[in-house]
Image: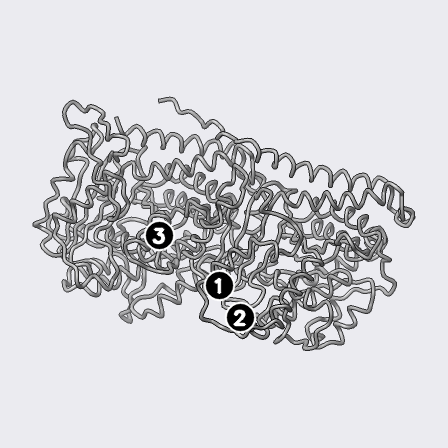
Amino acid sequence: MTQSVVVQVGQCGNQVGYRFWDLALREYASVNKAVLVDMEEGVISQILQGPLRELFDSAQLLTDVSGSGNNWATGHMTYGSVYRELIVDKLRKAAELCDCLQCFFLIHSLGGGTGSGLGTRVLGLLEEEFPGVSRIVTSMYPSAEDDVITSPYNSVLAMRELTEHAHCVLPVENQSLMDIVQKIQMVAHGAKPELMVRRNATLSSGQGGVHEVEKPFDAMNNIVANLLLNMTSSARFEGSLNVDLNEIAMNLVPFPRLHYLVPSLTPLYTLADVNAVPRRLDQMFSDAFSKDHQLIHANPKQSMYLACALMVRGNVHVSDLRRNIERLRPSLSFVSWNQEGWKTGLCSVPPVGHSHSLLALANNTCMKLNFMELKERFTKLYRKKAHLHHFLHVEGMDLGCFTEATSSLDSLIEEYDSLDATRAQATPDPPRLRIAT
Amino acid sequence: MSVVTVQLGQCGNQVGQELFDVLCSDALAAHRKTYSTASCERFFHLTSHGDLEARAVLIDMEPKAINSSMTKALKGGRWRYGEASHFSQKQGSGNNWANGFCVHGPRHKDAVEELVRREVERCDRLAGLMTMMSVAGGTGSGVGTYITQCLRDIYPASFILNHLTWPYGTGEVILQNYNSVLTLAHLYQLSDAIVVHENDTVHGICSRLLNIKPIAFTDINRVIAHQLGGVLQPALTPDSNGVYSLNPLGELVSALCCHPEYKLLSVSTIPQMPSSSVPYSSFSWTGLLKHLRQMLISNTKMEEGIDWHVRPPAASGRIRSVAGSSFNTSLANLLILRGKDVYCAETGNFEEATIYTPWLSPAEAFSAWKSPIPFNKYEKSATLVSNSQALLGPLEDIVRKAWNMFASRAYIHQYDTFGISEDNFLDSFTALEQVVSSYRELKS
């Protein structure tokens, strides 16, 4: 059995992380390994005083009272330098507790200062200090209407780090999470009797976990927590077709920088009526390819798949999997050299409250559009040099950081572009080696 | 004479457990003591407490599949794996052949060799070694290939049979084609015979012949186990002088793999039907063998949807006939008949020169083994192990898809990290194009 260490950075990161541990305990009792980093005491002390306080040793915490002021540079450069030794120390201690450390999960948001700036600094440290260990990052991307004005700067600066130093990134958007929560609530409260939703069996439910009172972001954060649980389920529980964590990046990342995977989770809820199982099963597969179930706004069906993983949990068999792949395949466009680009997993243990579930991770060129939008929002600010001085005043920060970050984003977009270009042309098979007979 | 089996990776360990299950229940159900004894001796070690322990070593780079197989065996109550006969690590091979072959293999070589040595030493006489693995993942394929290399070095005089499971063509693992190419290219130099089962084919058998719904991997594995059992259980061979053969692997290899360029063997079994129907069905050898032969020459992998229009090319002057394009030419065939009235079975239709490539006479190309004991509850059953063009299509698909991916250099950085370079890939492609070309030429 391998271990993973979860590193939660910033307010968002810690709130999501907190939900993760709550649900993880509910699903699988094990020793926690986490390092919590925040530059504001509030969130962390809440965790420390809450019901999960037993879980976290104060030795794993790192807080500073002042916060990063929504400034990536403050998080990355200032705090990054000041706390470097301390952070590395905490990481080492967590790693030493592990028998066989396989992966670091980093949870943070991109729009702010701590999660974004310090979080990506931590990412770099993880690469330096533990080069053989995978780095899977869950990043909350800011929506267009984000209330943090500098979020485009913070995000683009962070993106460069993610592209260079992460093995794979699971991008998530608050708006998508909100939409899912609303959908669940509509069904849960809408109620024709045959559509009664089973209590505590929704993607956003935290019931049955340690922390009973639900706070505003809890429902949304539970969804992200479920993403991480489903991703690791096949490494934790047995099944007829296991998927170890290292297999995910291995199969889904054809070129090192193209490692942004669109996550979809289904089902959103389990109906109380258990008799409709077979229809629900195929519906579950269809839903995984519907925009309503994605954790980020994107349109993969209109773009091209480079690779796609289907991680199934529960009472689902290989024939169900094959049947649905064959059924859905014609409506999807896969890159010419990966026409059968499916990575599949069957884990016997379903999530709490469900009989089965499906996590789809898609490496798809549609992410290009998200990145282009981000670039645009960035350019709007940068053109006018709005708020730039806050960043440039930070020691270690200069315009070069901005130009490097934009150029990294540009070349990422270009890589997606050149793959998309192949979609239009019918590529003939490359000529094979000839054998003299 | 005993066979030691090395089960590698999740697939190898799952299929292996089903295989030993079939072998054990068939051996214990047989009403002839000579057969039971021969079978048990071949595959199991009898402990001092009277328990049957499989002559097997279980290898995986992470523990879940091994634990599950060992538990399943114990639960069945009739046989089990040796308590110390397994080796696992904590972290898998990540579906990367290079990780399996270049890193895990060498790292754990000593431990694995020791386990195999212990099993071999428990055998009075070693008939040979069999490895079981898939080609799609990282451990079975990569570590499996490396271990085969080690076994070849340690036991140069022993027969090594590699059983491979090929994945669904519609994609189970994205790297499956790379892993398959690297495995097959390397194994071709090391193995005496490569027996292949394809998930697609076996899935078809489960759905169309056995009416299983839904189909789980356990069902797939049981069909493979049934077919392999039909090959490996004791039988009387032309060379065995009226007793059950003491050299099954050797005789299989010499019957089928006389040429180093032709090592790929496919397996077909007839009849195959839902177990509930078996007691109510009865067959004639003539009917069974007629269907089986047509399955062979029309390259149909099961007795459903057989194309009866396919005929061998006209015997006179070896003119290439119009029907030639869908005709499956054989290099060699081994027919194993088990059950009632087996000595009355006529196998003449498998001995016609027209179904074989011209450079072997039918007498050299065809062999028949027989056993009067019904196998796995079938009153009569026939297993055909064939060295023919049956696997050419699937092999070409694998090479084509792998080559397309290689041309774009996708995922190559993942292999490079663990020690397999572009040049290594090119060598493997070259080797397989040679195999493809050899099998394609069997037509003339």
Under mark 3, the amino acid is His
Name which quarter of the figure residue A103 lies in. bottom right
Give the foreground label among 1 and 3: 1
Q: Secondary structure at mark 1?
A: helix
Q: Is residue A399 left or right of residue B169?
A: right
Read off the residue under disc 1: A280
Q: Residue furthest left?
A: B344
Query: Where is A57 relative to B363, above or below?
Result: below
Under mark 1, the amino acid is Arg
Chain where mark 1 sits: A
Q: Which label number is shown at residue B203? A: 3
Name which quarter of the figure residue A413 lies in. top right
Chain where mark 3 sits: B
Q: How packed is label 2: few (under 14 Cα within 10 Å), some, or many (20 or more)?
A: many
Query: How far apart are the two marked residues, 2 and 3, measured between alpha carbons?
Result: 32 Å
Q: Is residue B84 left or right of residue A41?
A: left
Query: Residue A203 or B98: which is nearer the viewer?
Result: A203
In this rendering, the count of numbered labels is 3
Circles 2, 1 touching at the beta carbon (< 8 Å): yes
Query: How far apart are the two marked residues, 2 and 1, measured between alpha carbons?
Result: 10 Å
